[in-house]
Image (spheres, grey):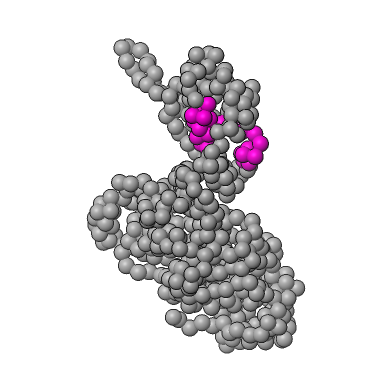
């Protein structure tokens, strides 16, 4: 473990620093307004990295704690005051460098929290990244991960591979009676504990251990993970490397769920997976072992990455070299990886005996956390038996297109197939039979499922022997894909506006 610069103080000292930050405008709103995020949250916009003489107190705090800047000690005392500087120094948050002061850590105001991570200088010749670096909580991938974690109340929340502890800190602050953050790095544990004290959170606990090791038999109502998932041939950084296929740590997170996820609980994970001879979502189910019949699985594919593209990214980032190409190619062929997938996984433990489901969806242009929440609720209702609800609900067609495929046969165009295309709630391109394409326009007037069945019997499209329950289940599958919409409790959320 590398040297940890921070020092723990009394609750009163932490309280003074917290109040000082707020009083000086070092808040999420003000920081977001000041930062010029041309590429991402880690990009400094002033290469000299020196705070300007005409800076305000808020400018100075942003410069010190977010832009890897230094500032003259006289300027710091003038803008921040001697007592505040002493408090910051007593906690190990600033250090002198000649006649300058520099922050020892990065502090990012997020919502009502202050979250610590290691300083991050992406400038050429900047500071070397240490092995157990505590990664910033506000980069795009992490913010995407956080957006999928529901804010609904729960008793016990756990984040594994916690890093800065950001998800656990938000849970403790917003919705969990008690929140936990575990990480294999003691440095991450210390940073997360410090953040909890800086924010006055008494219902937060950080511990060091491999995935669930510190749990000591506890079960949790909600578990979240953003594990290291970059495929590597050799170790890089603790926050980065996910084994040679990128799945080593996420697989362990899933394998141990039967011992730690409470009935009715959900596990949320943002990671990298891969399709092989067996589809990724089916392999995730296999990871659950002999108790997989207790769990529902939903996988949303955010992006598809070809193996060659992944290797090229590694070369550009310096984690792989051109000489590694043959080794990577042999590895991917041995594992029979056809493509990599950036995914969000949700695994739900059922509360009563019933069939479980496995669904996979492809992210559409307007997909997001609300749509995933709707999908989970609807698939759970289907698993419990929603036939009567479907038959009695008003049904309408989704935003669907019918694409006809024609081939030349006998000197003319001949229909060879038809596909239904939707982009909301998820992207789907489904080759369907004539009956599925036939029924959708008949919903334009808003029929119930039962009325639609009677209409199609009257038109001779289906037999009167077609059981209502089987017909309802077929409609339920089309609702799940977005081809049909329902009114009432399971009405789709209004799609968000595209930028």
Note whether 40 is above or below 493 in the view shown. below
Rendering coords of residue 209 (x, y %): 45, 74
**Magenta segment: does it hold 493?**
yes
Q: Quadrant of residue 405?
A: top left
Q: Is residue 167 visible?
A: no
Quarter placement of the N terminus: bottom left
Q: Is residue 331 left or right of residue 404?
A: left
Q: Is residue 14 left or right of residue 376?
A: right
Q: Is residue 194 visible?
A: yes
**Magenta segment: does it hold 419?**
no
Rendering coords of residue 139 (x, y %): 54, 61
* Residue situated in front as seen by the camera: 144 or 174: 174
Note whether 276 is above or below 31 in the view shown. above
Rendering coords of residue 468 (x, y %): 53, 26
* Residue situated in front as seen by the camera: 259 or 287: 259
Q: Residue at x 62, y 74 (%)?
A: 196
Rendering coords of residue 211 (x, y %): 45, 68
Q: Which residues are magenta?
A: 468-495
- What is the magenta segment's predominant secondary structure? helix
Q: Residue at x 60, y 47 (%)?
A: 370
Q: Residue at x 49, y 48 (%)?
A: 353
* Residue situated in front as seen by the camera: 432 or 69: 432
Note whether 474 is above or below 313 in the view shown. above
Point out the residue furthest to the right here. 23
Q: Is residue 442 left or right of residue 244?
A: right
Note whether 346 is above or below 25 in the view shown. above
Q: Residue at x 48, y 83 (%)?
A: 3
């Amino acid at each position: 473990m590398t040297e940890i610069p921070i020092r723990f103080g009394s609750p009163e000292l932490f309280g003074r620093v917290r109040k000082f930050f707020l009083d000086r405008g070092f808040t999420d709103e003000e920081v977001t307004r000041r930062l010029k995020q041309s590429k991402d949250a880690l990009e400094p916009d002033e290469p000299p990295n020196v705070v300007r003489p005409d800076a305000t107190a808020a400018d100075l705090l942003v410069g010190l704690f977010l832009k890897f800047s230094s500032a003259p000690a006289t300027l710091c005392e003038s803008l921040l005051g001697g007592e505040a500087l002493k408090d910051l120094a007593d906690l190990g948050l600033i250090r002198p460098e000649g006649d300058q002061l520099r922050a020892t850590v990065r502090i990012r105001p997020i919502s009502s929290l202050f979250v610590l991570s290691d300083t991050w200088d992406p400038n050429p010749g900047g500071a070397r990244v240490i092995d157990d670096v505590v990664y910033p909580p506000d980069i795009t991938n992490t913010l995407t991960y956080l957006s999928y974690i529901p804010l609904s109340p729960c008793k016990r929340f756990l984040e594994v591979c916690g890093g800065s502890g950001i998800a656990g800190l938000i849970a403790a602050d917003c919705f969990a009676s008690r929140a936990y953050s575990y990480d294999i790095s003691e440095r991450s544990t210390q940073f997360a504990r410090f953040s909890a004290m800086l924010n006055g959170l008494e219902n937060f606990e950080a511990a060091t251990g491999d995935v669930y090791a510190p749990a000591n038999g506890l079960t949790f109502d909600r578990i979240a993970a953003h594990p290291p998932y970059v495929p590597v041939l050799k170790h890089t950084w603790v926050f980065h490397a996910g084994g040679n296929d990128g799945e080593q740590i996420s697989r362990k997170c899933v394998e141990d769920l039967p011992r730690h996820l409470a009935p009715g609980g959900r596990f949320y994970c943002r990671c990298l997976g891969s399709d092989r001879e067996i589809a990724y979502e089916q392999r995730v189910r296999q990871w659950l072992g002999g108790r997989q019949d207790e769990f529902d699985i939903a996988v949303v594919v955010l992006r598809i990455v070809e193996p060659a593209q992944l290797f090229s990214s590694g070369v550009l980032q310096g984690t792989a070299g051109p000489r590694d190409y043959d080794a990577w190619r042999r590895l991917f062929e041995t594992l029979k990886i056809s493509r990599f997938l950036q995914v969000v996984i949700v695994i739900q433990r059922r509360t009563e005996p019933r069939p479980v489901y496995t669904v996979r969806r492809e992210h559409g242009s307007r997909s997001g956390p609300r749509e995933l929440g709707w999908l989970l609720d609807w698939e759970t209702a289907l698993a419990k038996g929603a036939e009567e609800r479907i038959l009695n609900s008003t049904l309408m067609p989704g935003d669907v297109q019918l694409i006809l495929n024609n081939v030349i046969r006998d000197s003319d165009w001949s229909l060879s197939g038809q596909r239904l295309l939707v982009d909301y709630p998820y992207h789907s391109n489904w080759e369907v039979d004539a009956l599925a394409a036939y029924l959708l326009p008949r919903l334009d007037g808003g029929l119930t499922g039962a009325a639609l069945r009677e209409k199609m019997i009257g038109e001779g499209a289906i037999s009167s022997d077609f059981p209502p329950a089987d017909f309802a289940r077929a409609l339920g599958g089309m609702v799940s894909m977005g081809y049909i919409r329902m009114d009432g409790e399971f009405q789709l959320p209004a799609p968000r506006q595209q930028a």
